[in-house]
């Protein structure tokens, strides 16, 4: 592996096969290292944001709300309150005298204006410092307006995204157990950890519908406060983005006795396995469930497979790098790339846990670089060293790939293409194909060789002819 | 349109109030919340300034999220790497102070990035916990006196006071305040262009070159945030104004400072004012050179400073612009336009729209300089049948409210007005920052005769396209 860039981070990088696997993670980012990570606020905002009939009020100066205004592709089949960006836009006087009054007034006017089913109030760095009593304000407004007004303890500096996920789960959990569950059947589940980017949750719900299963609550893509309030009536929790909603699943298991299963909807095996896992859970209640599920998978694969084979012909042997928010997504991506005949040579995440990385190390090929909480310097060095053909990441990773003359696939919350489900695998393969096979890479300096511009300019006409 | 040459020894007179403004309708209720802000936070502006210095690395003193959010926001517009370092404060530092993390972060950036300059901007967190950044930087210099340290400029940018534009202006001023050394002489004039596009910066450099005036632009991110394809990933993108040039700004023959709503040009206000007061550099303060009259003002100032007539190339550009004004005037005449965005840009754009016969009906900004209305009215004087509504400190909820009443034909502003333009089914000409839903936003040209011509083409074509789209016939010859 290339020379280390940050000695302090040596134990957060591992090359599979070089010594026993051990990776440090869940550590504060190194000051000055330009981490790709976000903050606690970001984590809670990501999780709660897609609840479309709730008011999401950011209590703080304008930046936190402005930078998160409608940047994500979480679609709603009805209300779209989540696409607006609400802030108390704290000013100097509020910081000095406290922002509680402003918060209360803002909540009252916004609730009157939009009649939301609930309100989430996000605490930002500064609120944690000036010590506004969010709980008290929320309680008061809740009593006055008759809707749940829920504080989200998401002060940015209190850790990284993971703490934000937990704060979001705790906030949602306060809604649960309050709704009527009398009409929920025994073949029912909640979808956890899916954010309905580009309508993905609709694809997944449709699979479950075809299997004969009712989805009680989408948590949180295309989410509704009322559904979450009755989510405790479902028979099963299906958790996808486990990093973000596993805490909620555990809380629900403890309080309501709802079992959960961990799945992924990305790629062929993981998507199929997700459906089979659910089918196996319900098979005693419905003996035909497994058969119906097999039929569904067969039908979908019959369409999918030939198209993948076509794309695979071009992609065979190409190399990919993955750097995503949560580590769990990386597992599915590695398998998905294998279907395209491609190998993954770099795999990393912003907030993976010890267990995540161990699992990751197991499915990676020898020589793969595994990295926690990386930064542009490391990522660019790895991409060059492994000479990859495509990098999978988010907005902040894109320019790193492009500057190095490497293809890129957006696999974050801002994407507008559905990548989940069997149809999502086709979309993914098409996107990979579009970027990897583009002719533009032939012309970029890194691929074209350092062809001197002079050869194209004066005096070389004869030589060339 | 105005050029103010400021005698460094005299306090400038306040801008004259203009007559006949239509009063802004007060809000039905005193709303306290903000919905869909028409501004960004103060440190973001500062990071852009530091990115415009050669070897410059922006550094946010605060929690990790601020740097990451601003990075992704800026990357989406420029489609270029934008590395912003952070002191990555956690709970412990929030309680006990962030100085240690700040110093460690600075060392890391100097060591690993090889920074030529680090620009430290504070955030709401570090301002509120009361971190003494200048003090920490002094300590830092003492502690590591044996190392060769890159210069560090710091600016206080609490996000609870002012918008990204105040942060931008403050960072430009901080550079002039902390980096300029006395006793240096230079032939280069200073230019503080404000927050304009990469293409604008390149065009400005061409214009100064045409007058054979060497120029020190602050900031100049025209290359750092719009670089060529290279063989390697650059730790620090090439380009930017050299620190050496910045150090000599106090010995420049003149300063040009653009912005119609900037603070008064005293030492405390802006870079240009500071250099005038402290180093005696004559200041030419004018609006952003957008449209005919503001460009004329700029070129007139260039003629004065360079003692040369406007070069033929730009004189021809001016001529072509006027020719196009005439050719295009009927397509746009009396169309009603809503403008929103950053205040200085707004004033320039309003001035231009008024010149071509479009009626600005609403000029709205999220900033609160207190100077927008006078500047807009001055720009519209004599050209429009009625003064536009001017709204400061508004969000898109307010803008939408007013725009629905005003029935505009056209929007002029950044991407964030898209949903409103779509709702009202009117074209949106994308200008300024951020442009997140179109390609090449950072290559949009707004400045000088050439920029005005580009804008004119886009406005006229938007009107032609609208007419075609709305027509049942589908005219192919308009």
Image: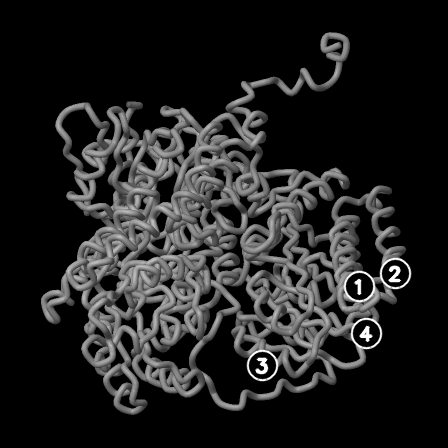
Identify the image's colour scheme: rainbow, by chain, secondary structure or one colour: one colour
> Residue A128 appears at what percent x and percent y?
24, 68
Residue where numbered disc 2 is placed: B478
Number of numbered discs on residues: 4
Identify the residue at horizontal 75%, vertical 10% (top origin): A465
- Tell me, yes or no, whether dots 1 and 4 are on the same chain: yes
Residue where numbered disc 3 is placed: B401
Residue where numbered disc 1 is placed: B468
Numbered tag placed on residue A276 in the rendering: none
Q: Is residue B68 above or below residue A14?
A: below
Mark 4 or mark 2, earlier in chain: 4
Q: CA distance from mark 4 to mark 2?
A: 18 Å
Camera-side mark, 1 or 4:
1
Q: Is residue B228 above or below residue A118?
A: above
Numbered tag placed on residue B334 in the rendering: 4
Mark 1 or mark 2, earlier in chain: 1
Q: Are marks 1 and 2 in contact (CB under 8 Å)?
A: yes
- Tell me, yes or no, whether dots 4 and 2 are on the same chain: yes
Mark 4 lies on a secondary structure that is loop
Camera-side mark, 3 or 1:
1
Mark 3 or mark 1, earlier in chain: 3
């Amino acid at each position: 592996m290339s020379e280390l860039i940050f000695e302090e981070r040596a134990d957060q990088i591992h090359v599979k096969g070089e010594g026993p696997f051990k990776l440090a993670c869940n550590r504060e980012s190194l000051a000055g290292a330009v981490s790709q990570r976000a903050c606690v606020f970001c984590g809670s905002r990501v999780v709660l944001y897609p609840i479309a009939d709730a008011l999401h009020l950011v209590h703080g100066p304008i930046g936190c709300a402005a930078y998160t205004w409608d940047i994500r592709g979480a679609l709603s089949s009805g209300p779209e309150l989540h696409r607006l960006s609400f802030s108390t836009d704290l000013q100097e006087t509020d910081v000095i005298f406290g922002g509680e009054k402003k918060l209360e007034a803002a909540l009252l006017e916004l609730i009157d204006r939009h009649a939301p089913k609930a309100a989430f109030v996000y605490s930002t760095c500064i609120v944690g410092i000036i010590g506004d009593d969010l709980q008290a304000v929320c309680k008061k407004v809740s009593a006055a307006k008759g809707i749940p007004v829920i504080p989200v303890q998401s002060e940015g500096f209190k850790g990284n995204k993971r703490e934000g996920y937990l704060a979001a789960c705790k906030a949602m959990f306060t809604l649960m157990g309050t709704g009527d569950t009398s009409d929920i059947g025994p073949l029912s589940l909640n979808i956890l950890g899916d954010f309905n980017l580009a309508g993905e949750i609709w694809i997944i719900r449709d699979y479950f519908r075809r299997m004969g299963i009712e989805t009680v609550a989408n948590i949180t893509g295309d989410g509704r406060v009322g559904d979450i309030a009755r989510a405790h009536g479902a028979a099963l929790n299906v958790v996808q983005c486990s990093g973000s909603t596993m805490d909620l699943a555990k809380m629900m298991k403890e309080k309501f006795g709802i079992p959960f299963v961990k799945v992924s909807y990305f790629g062929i095996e993981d998507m199929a396995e997700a459906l089979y896992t659910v089918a196996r859970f319900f098979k005693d209640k419905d003996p035909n469930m497994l058969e119906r599920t097999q039929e569904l998978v067969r039908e979908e694969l019959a369409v999918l497979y030939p198209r993948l084979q076509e794309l695979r012909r071009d992609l065979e042997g190409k190399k990919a790098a993955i750097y995503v928010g949560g580590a769990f997504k990386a597992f599915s991506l590695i398998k998905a790339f294998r279907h395209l005949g491609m190998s993954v040579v770099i795999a990393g995440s912003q907030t993976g846990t010890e267990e995540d990385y161990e699992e990751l190390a197991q499915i990676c090929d020898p020589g793969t670089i595994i990295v926690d909480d990386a930064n542009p310097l490391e990522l660019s060095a790895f991409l060059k060293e492994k000479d990859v053909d495509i990098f999978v990441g988010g907005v902040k990773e894109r320019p790193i790939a492009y500057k190095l003359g490497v293809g890129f696939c957006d696999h974050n919350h801002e994407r507008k293409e559905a990548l989940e489900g069997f149809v999502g695998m086709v979309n993914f393969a098409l996107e990979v194909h579009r970027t990897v096979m583009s002719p533009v890479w032939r012309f970029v300096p890194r691929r074209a060789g350092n062809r001197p511009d002079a050869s194209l300019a004066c005096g070389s006409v004869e030589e060339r002819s | 349109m105005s050029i103010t040459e400021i005698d460094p020894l005299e306090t400038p007179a306040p801008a004259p109030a203009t007559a006949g403004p239509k009063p802004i309708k007060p809000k039905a209720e005193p709303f306290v919340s903000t919905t869909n802000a028409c501004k960004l936070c103060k440190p973001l502006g500062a990071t852009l300034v530091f990115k415009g210095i050669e070897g410059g690395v922006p550094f946010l003193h605060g929690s990790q999220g601020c740097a990451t959010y601003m990075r992704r926001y800026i990357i989406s517009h420029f489609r270029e790497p934008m590395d912003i370092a952070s002191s990555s404060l956690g709970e412990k530092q929030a309680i006990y102070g962030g100085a240690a993390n700040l110093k460690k972060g600075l060392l890391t950036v100097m060591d690993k990035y090889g920074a030529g300059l680090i620009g430290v901007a504070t955030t709401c967190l570090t301002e509120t916990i009361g971190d003494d950044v200048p003090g920490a930087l002094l300590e830092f210099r003492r502690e590591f006196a044996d190392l060769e340290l890159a210069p560090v400029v710091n600016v206080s940018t609490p996000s609870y006071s002012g918008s990204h534009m105040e942060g931008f202006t403050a960072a430009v001023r901080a550079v002039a305040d902390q980096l300029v050394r006395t006793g240096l002489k230079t032939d280069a004039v200073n230019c503080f262009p404000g927050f304009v596009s990469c293409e604008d910066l390149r065009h400005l450099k061409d214009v100064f070159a045409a007058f054979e005036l060497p120029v020190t632009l602050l900031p100049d991110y025209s290359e750092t945030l719009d670089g060529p394809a290279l063989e390697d990933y650059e730790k620090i993108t090439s380009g930017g104004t050299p620190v050496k040039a910045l150090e000599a700004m106090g010995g420049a023959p003149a300063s040009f400072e653009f912005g119609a709503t900037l603070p008064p040009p005293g030492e405390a206000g802006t870079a240009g004012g500071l250099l005038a007061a402290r180093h005696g550099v004559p200041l030419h303060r004018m609006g952003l050179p957008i449209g005919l009259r503001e460009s004329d003002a700029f070129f007139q100032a260039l003629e004065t400073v360079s003692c040369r007539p406007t070069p033929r190339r730009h004189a021809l550009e001016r001529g072509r612009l006027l020719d196009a004004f005439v050719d295009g005037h009927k397509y746009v005449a009396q169309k009603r336009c809503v403008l929103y965005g950053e205040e200085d840009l707004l004033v320039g754009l309003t001035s231009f729209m008024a010149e071509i016969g479009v009626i600005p009906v609403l000029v709205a900004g999220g900033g609160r300089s207190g100077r927008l209305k006078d500047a807009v009215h001055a720009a519209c004087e004599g050209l429009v049948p009625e003064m536009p509504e001017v709204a400061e400190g508004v969000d898109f909820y307010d803008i939408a409210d007013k725009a629905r009443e005003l029935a505009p034909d056209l929007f002029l502003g950044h991407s964030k007005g898209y949903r409103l333009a779509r709702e009202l089914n009117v074209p949106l000409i994308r200008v300024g920052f951020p442009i997140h839903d179109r390609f090449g936003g950072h290559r949009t040209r707004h400045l000088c005769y050439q920029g005005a011509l580009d804008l004119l083409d886009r406005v006229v074509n938007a009107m032609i396209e609208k007419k075609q789209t709305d027509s049942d016939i589908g005219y192919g010859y308009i």
